[in-house]
Amino acid sequence: MIAYLDSSVLLRVVLGQRGKLAEWERVETGVASALVEVECLRTLDRLRLRADLPDSELALRRETVYRLTEEMEIVEPGMAVLRRAAQPFPTPLGTVDAVHLATALMWREARGEDLIMATHDRALGTAARASGLRVIGQ
């Protein structure tokens, strides 16, 4: 399975949280915007500051983010993606989620391959479905 993985999916794996994507082991190719690394690392930094995440734990979680993203196909959010993200979508969507959805849609169009949106974010999942993508993780 080829899946577009957003930060909500990666963070549940990185943090060992309940509700990890049921299909995680079936993902053969993960695709993501370069934003996913930034989102994950910023979340870890907030946990360090707000939840007193110990340095050793922070280092392990950061290493996991780097390892996972190295195994994925990372798409840089160039001007074409940003312009697509600026266009209207069928349902309300914030800026970062619009970049994720635009990235997924443009990847699918460029490759001509089936791409599944993997997210635990309801707004992104709804917009992805309304844009013709199959969604898992909700």
Image: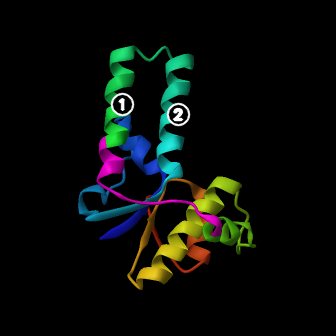
State the mark number for residue 61. 1
**What residue lies at 32% left-to-right and 37% top-to-bottom?**
64
Return the residue at label 2.
Answer: 43
The residues bearing labels 1 and 2 have C-alpha atoms spaced at a distance of 11 Å
Answer whether labels 1 and 2 touch (C-beta < 8 Å).
no
Mark 1 crowd level (few <14, some 14–19, many ≥20, 10 Å Cα) = many
Q: For residue 123, say whether it is visible.
A: no
Q: Which residue type does callout 2 highlight? A: Thr
Q: Which residues are magenta?
A: 67-79
Task: Pick out the residue farthest to the bottom.
Answer: 112
Residue 74, position in %: x, y?
A: 42, 58
Of residues 63 and 88, the one drawn nearer to the viewer in this rendering: 63
Residue 115, position in %: x, y?
A: 41, 74
Q: For residue 46, say whether it is visible.
A: yes
Q: Is residue 23 left or right of residue 137?
A: left
Residue 122, position in %: x, y?
A: 59, 57
Of residues 56 and 52, the one drawn nearer to the viewer in this rendering: 56
The first of marks 1 and 2 along the sequence is: 2
Quick check: is 68 in the magenta stretch? Answer: yes
**What residue lies at 29% left-to-right and 53% top-to-bottom?**
71
Q: Is residue 72 left or right of residue 98?
A: left
Q: Which residue type does callout 1 highlight? A: Arg
State the mark number for residue 103. none
